[in-house]
Image (spheres, grey):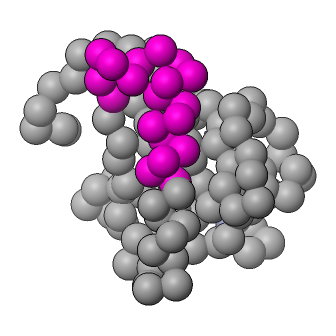
Amino acid sequence: MSNCLFCKIVSGEISTDFVYKDENIIAFRDINPQAPTHILIIPREHIETLNDIDQSHVELLGAMQLTASYLAKEEGIYEKGFRTVFNCNRDAGQTVFHIHLHLLGGRSMGWPPG
Ligand code: AMP
Ligand code: ZN
């Protein structure tokens, strides 16, 4: 998708603070962090929202969650705790329409979320 911000990060057109890359997934630090650790884990494939995933994406979604656990260990927040979040569409506050898993940690968090 030519005008997708996260596709531009995948292609290297926009530079960012990468923390992980593999064949299918990249991860980088959120530009506006909401916690001491705030990383976005995204597929290289352009998928607009969680409503656009199907059976073919099951392995990819699992790999994204495993990447979050790996990065939580790297960030030293694995034992204390962390949160992973997908926002889907307007009511959840999705602003970038290329799916991304937020990894948040390094402080205690409230529930329910805002
Ligand atoms: P969401 O509101 O779930 O769609 O999350 C989008 C996230 O992308 C927000 O937390 C933004 O701060 C973050 N973001 C937007 N532009 C960039 C960028 N260029 N690099 C890193 N994170 C970004
Ligand atoms: Zn995209």
**In the current view of this chain or complex, which residue is farthest to the right?**
13
Q: Position of residue 9 (x, y in %)?
A: 77, 51
Tell me: 11 left or right of 58: right
**Numbered range of the magenta stretch:** 64-82
Q: Position of residue 47 (x, y in %)?
A: 57, 73
Residue 48 part of the magenta segment: no
Q: Which of the 4 image quadrants contains residue 35?
A: top left
Say which residue appears at 40% left-offset and 30% top-offset: 104
Closer to the camera, 90 or 16?
A: 16
Q: Quadrant of the N terminus?
A: bottom right
Tell me: 96 left or right of 65: right
On the question of residue 68 being in view, the answer is yes
Say which residue appears at 70% left-offset and 39% top-offset: 20
Say which residue appears at 29% left-offset and 56% top-offset: 92
Say which residue appears at 74% left-offset and 46% top-offset: 21
Prevailing secondary structure of the magenta residues: helix
